[in-house]
Amino acid sequence: MYVNSLCGSGWLQKASFLGNRSQDAGASFHQVGVCRVARHANCRASSPLRRFLAMHTRVPRNENFSKLQGGYLFPQIAQRRREYLEKHPDAALISLGIGDTTQPIPPHICAGLTQGAKKLATKEGYSGYGDGEGLYALRKSIASRLYGDRIRPEEVFVSDGAKCDIARLQMVFGSEVTVAVQDPSYPVYVDTAVMTGQTGRINADTRQYAGIVYMRCDAANDFFPDLSKTPRTDLIFFCSPNNPTGAAATREQLAELVAFARHNGSIIVYDAAYAPFIRDPAVPRSILEIDGALECAIEVNSFSKYAGFTGVRLGWTVVPSALRFADGTPVAKDFGRVMNTAFNGASNIAQQGGMACLDDEGLAEIEQLISYYLENTRILREGMESLGFSVYGGRNAPYIWVRFPGRSSWDVFTEFLEKCQVVTVPGAGFGPAGVEYVRLSAFAPREACQEAVRRIQTAFGGRPADPIAASSFQ
Ligand code: PLP
């Protein structure tokens, strides 16, 4: 009672807490476990009481954030990895997990970055804030060198990356739109939809959020959704080459998707972050190659995987001027408004790096870099196939998607970690349809991929080719 009455306001708790700290010469509230108020009450603070006594403001939490599940996938994996290393400090872990690049930025492209930085130290070369939409020369280069001038420079918005653009697009669309995602998919589409208020709560059994249409993509449908059974939504998030399945949609499949969107009056948000991995001429590098796409699709893209810019941060989004909302407003108008309000233009140094990516020398370096990762992909894919696993993706993409029928992907993740010291990504983290799969990433150094295959073959060698029988192997 006494504690309750003393702690009626957050500010009183704060004052009390600060007083305690000065008295205890820096010892924290949690270390001491006794707060000034609790001491007055002559009691040792229990955990719930301690939580109750903790300082809090009177600002309500954004309800949408309470709908989010767990942490974002990759911090969870990092946590598991840390826990494993605490128990086994000498383990030489190999990470085929997070899709982060590992190879150095090639020299010509890097020179673009360093020259960009050096220019800033000169009177003539210095620049401050730039256009929110990006450097015009870079927008022009993207339009001509990557899209063969099918789009105009004004339709290209340069940014600090595809992930950030996806979040900013959600800001444009707001909470009232309905969304469809591939299942499995890159978690950012679903999580930003939840944050924006486009969904209800998650269903504990199906692991699906109310309000999202999950378009199942698995081996049975060649990882392309059955659109004849897909209800209409305002937005369709579609990623090809796909993270995590490694599937790359063919021209016919993309034409079907565009026809579906046009028929329904929907907008496709097409994530082409892995486009440079496409080597098969039957697979388009951009959805904007498809007739009719300019009136129904936005394309987000990034230099992250093209040129090892994951840390540099540079991407772009194409919003065609022909794409309009129901009331006729060009979508580009609102996206431009967001770019100039909630963003202030990509780093001028990064943009100089982007310019270097797109000249002849830069494009040749990109091809070489991508070839390196594609060779890793081949090594991983063939290594896993040699063990009789059901292996998908990994041809026009840097990801291998391996199926373990009847098993939980977190169990398989743990088994690879403990038996091989290889970090993978559990498919369940990408959506309910990923529950029997793990993803292997080829963004590791060559020797790491070779060593990972050797370890996996040693641990799982002799595993029967029949995947059903394989599922009983522990
Ligand atoms: N889109 C997909 C499908 C991704 O897998 C990733 C990163 O892994 C991104 C976007 C993020 O791109 P960026 O680094 O440009 O934010």
Image (spheres, helix red, strand yellow):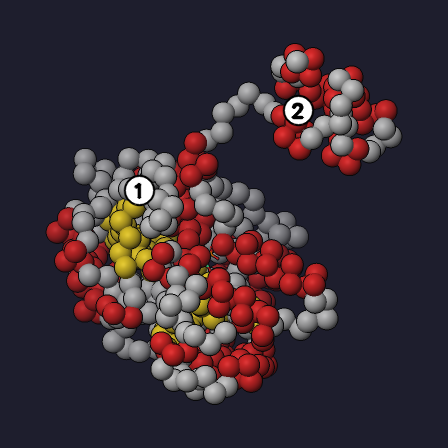
Q: Which of the pair 358/126 is nearer the observer?
A: 358
Q: Residue at the location (49% across, 42% down)?
A: 344
Mark 2 or 1, nearer chain start: 2
Name the quarter showing ligand 1: bottom left
Residue under pointer 1: 210
Residue 416: which quarter of the image?
bottom right
Question: SS class of the residue under badge 1?
Answer: loop
Q: Pointer 2: residues within 10 angstroms few (<14), some, or many (20+)?
A: many
Q: Is residue 470 left or right of residue 57?
A: left
Q: Is residue 33 visible?
A: yes
Q: Is residue 145 visible?
A: no
Q: Is residue 255 left or right of residue 1?
A: left
Q: Residue at the location (53% across, 23% down)?
A: 59
Q: Residue at the location (16% across, 56% down)?
A: 229
Q: Residue 392, percent across and down?
A: 36, 74
Q: Note whether 282 is above or below 241 in the view shown.
A: below
Q: Residue 72, percent across and down?
A: 50, 50
